[in-house]
Image (tube, helix red, strand yellow):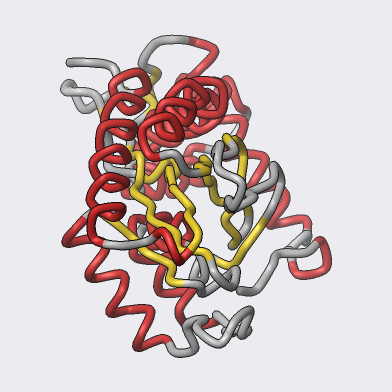
Amino acid sequence: MRTLTPESLDTSPAAVKSADRVLDLFELLARGGRDMSHTEISEALEIPKSSLSQLLKTMVARDYLEITSSGRGYRLGQAFRTLSYSVGCAQDMVSLAQPFLEELTRETGESCALNQIKDDMAEVTATVLGPARLVAHMRLGDRAPLYATSGGKVILAHMPDEFQRQYLANVRFEPATPRTLSSVGGLKKQIAAIRASGFAYSYEEWTPGIVGIATGVLGADGYILGALNVALPAPRFNEAAQAKCEHALRRATEGLRRLLVPRR
């Protein structure tokens, strides 16, 4: 994936001015707490009406703004609320997930973790170590490519289509083990399977001798907030262990989602 750097950003005066206007508009509507007309926004931000019209049109088209039923006012839209909600949930997850991870380990006897996306990697943001002598170790802050771990694959499978398109166009597969995925075609097949079943698997693809099983925690809008995974040594992986892990993961993710997603 291409990473944005200060050098790659457009910092021309026109680009900076446009960015400032977008941020000023969001702050104005959030701070005011009420609908505002085209004229009120123009006067408050000191933006010519002609320039403001195109900005408002773009924001409405992207659902960051909504036009009121009267057709004369603007307010923050669903896309803005969704973005704010998703960020808040992702931040809350680390503390809320810990009891569910502990229960996962008690139920399965294996190590487990919460994974969240950071740049184009999956990062371990909470973890519980299994009680057995032979266990998988997942350390806080560990990062892995999305294509290589069960948690990363679940996150990728539920990311927006545009993110997936860019990721698949730019991904470079590195063989962490002999079983690491090595083709976009193979990854696409797994993404489709994950969307169908809800579970992702990593069969010794990141760490030799370790099998990972994961499922995602989705927000109210379907956006992926994170993934819970269980990791167990390959000699202990069989149909019974798989069924036990999947059942425990399903219960844990449903319980965590109930805390994160308010009932309507």
At a point 36% along the width and 16% down the height, the residue shown is 35
- Outermost residue on the right side: it is 7
Residue 66 seen from this side: no
- Outermost residue on the top side: it is 33
Using residue 99 as the reference point, say whether residue 197 is left or right of it: left
The quarter holding residue 10 reads bottom right
Q: How many marks?
A: 0
Q: Quadrant of the N terminus?
A: bottom right
How far from the left and from the top, in percent, is residue 39? Answer: 44, 24
At a point 32% along the width and 28% down the height, the residue shown is 257
Between 24 and 236, the one nearer to me in the picture: 236
Between 152 and 17, the one nearer to me in the picture: 152
At a point 48% along the width and 74% down the height, the residue shown is 166
Q: Is residue 111 above or below residue 196?
A: above
Residue 142 seen from this side: yes
How far from the left and from the top, in percent, is residue 158? Answer: 34, 55
Q: Quadrant of the C terminus?
A: top left
How far from the left and from the top, in percent, is residue 248? Answer: 29, 37
Using residue 174 as the reference point, say whether residue 186 is left or right of it: left
Q: Is residue 121 above or below residue 258?
A: below
How far from the left and from the top, in percent, is residue 51? Answer: 52, 46
Q: Is residue 214 above or below residue 53?
A: below
Q: Is residue 238 above or below residue 264?
A: below
At a point 38% along the width and 56% down the height, the residue shown is 213
